[in-house]
Structure formats: C-alpha cells, structure tokens
Image (cartoon, grey):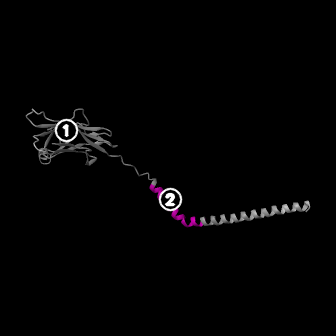
Amino acid sequence: MNNNQVGQTKENQKLIQLKQQLLHYKSELAKYKHINHFYKKKLSLNEGDNQITFKEENFDTVDPDNKTEPLISASAYFNYSVFFPEKEEALNETLIVGHFHIVNSGQVELNNPFIALKVTPVKAATISGKIAVTENSETVIYTSDEEWQHMHHDWKNILREKGEYWLKPSHCRVIKPGETLNFTNFDLRLNNIDSEGQIKVEGVCFSTEMTNGIPSMNQITFYY
C-alpha cells in the first residue's frame, strides 16, 4: 500500500469518527429537547397552582400588621426563718419571720399590684407586720416607707372564715420590668401547738394585667 492510499485511509477513519460524533450529539440533542418539552408541559400545567402557593406563602410570612405583644410575666416566692420558743418560756409560741417577693419578669409595667396570703388551717396562725388598719388615700407611685393595707372592709371576717389576707401596698402602684415588690418582715405566729399537724402559708400575686394571679413558687410549711 502506497503513501497515497495510507493517507486516504486515515482521512476516511477521521470522517467516520466525525460522523459518529455527529450522530452522538444529535442523539443527545434530541434527548434534551424531549426532556425540555416534558418539563415545559409539566410547568404549564402546574403554573397556576404554583403561583397561588407562592402568593399564599408570602402573605403568611410577610405581614406588616403582625406585631408581637409585649411579654407579661411575674414570679413570686417566700423566704423565711423559724424561731422556736425557749423551754422556760410560759407561752408555747413559735415565730416565723417571712418575706414575700413579687418580681416583674416581663416587658411591661404591672399596675396596681396586690397579694393574697392563705393560712391553712384557718385558726392555726396569725400574720402581722407592716399592715396599716386605716387606708392611706394619698396617691403614690413608690416610696421608701413600706406599708400595706387590707383590701376589704370586712377583712376580719375573711380572715376568720377563710384564713386569707388580701393586701395591697400603699407605697407602690407600679412594678416596672425587672423590679421587685417586697412584703418584708411579716410575723407568722403559731400559738399553743399541742398536737401534731401541719401549717401552710400559700401566696398569690395579682395586678391589673394579671387578674387570674400568679401562685408563688414555694410555700411556708411547718410540721409540728
């Protein structure tokens, strides 16, 4: 085989390879045209649903009128110390000195706060402390002199029948966020304990914003 024949053979091989590549590319192009047509048809069928869904999601997630309400929150708790009577004392009287704390843990002011303390059993103990008998009509927001008042005119009957002390501070009308209102150094006197039992004091705090009340996180409990 001469050189001309060899050269012609190589050219024929290249031509065959190019034809094969061309057929391959035509086949790939037809495949992608088919895929493209398929998805165009599918998108055209679902276009309306997709648009509606997109609009609904936008309205749900972007709402200029959707404003988060400020958090209203508070917590209350007791701390106290127990003083037992000396053996030589004539009166068998146990004294508990307590403090009741109301913490504004929310983001808004708590207006007109008040508390309720309940002694169980009703006649087992009495509470006394910085509680005024007469009402102070002077308008105050907060003063350094702590004073509390009974909320009901018939508080003696409520105390006698239910063992409940409903008290409001005359020195404070507003608890600001992060502040604490304290009912400090109240005396809980347990008189003439001559049998085994349990005395319990529960606390609840209220305000204009929290009419249902927030129970204290703990209680004063005394076993005898």
How far apart are labels 2 and 1 at the CA level? 59 Å
Judge left or right: residue 159 versus residue 30.
Answer: left
Residue in the picture at 72% in, 64% down: 24
Judge left or right: residue 78 versus residue 69.
Answer: left
Quadrant where the C terminus is found in the figure: top left
- Percent across and percent down for residue 32 are 66, 63
Q: Which of the marked residues, 2 or 1, is nearer the chain's N terminus?
A: 2
- Percent across and percent down for residue 156 are 12, 44
Q: Residues within 10 Å of mark 2 (few under 14, many from 20)?
A: few
In the structure shown, which secondary structural element does the residue marked by tag 2 occupy?
A: helix
Which of the two residues, 12 or 214, is positioned nearer the viewer here? 12
At label 2, which amino acid type do we have? Phe
- Percent across and percent down for residue 80 are 22, 37
- Assess whether residue 65 is covered by the magenta stretch: no
Q: Give the range drawn in magenta.
A: 40-60
Read off the residue under disc 1: 148
In the structure shown, which secondary structural element does the residue marked by tag 1 occupy?
A: strand
Read off the residue under disc 2: 54
Q: Main secondary structure of the magenta part?
A: helix
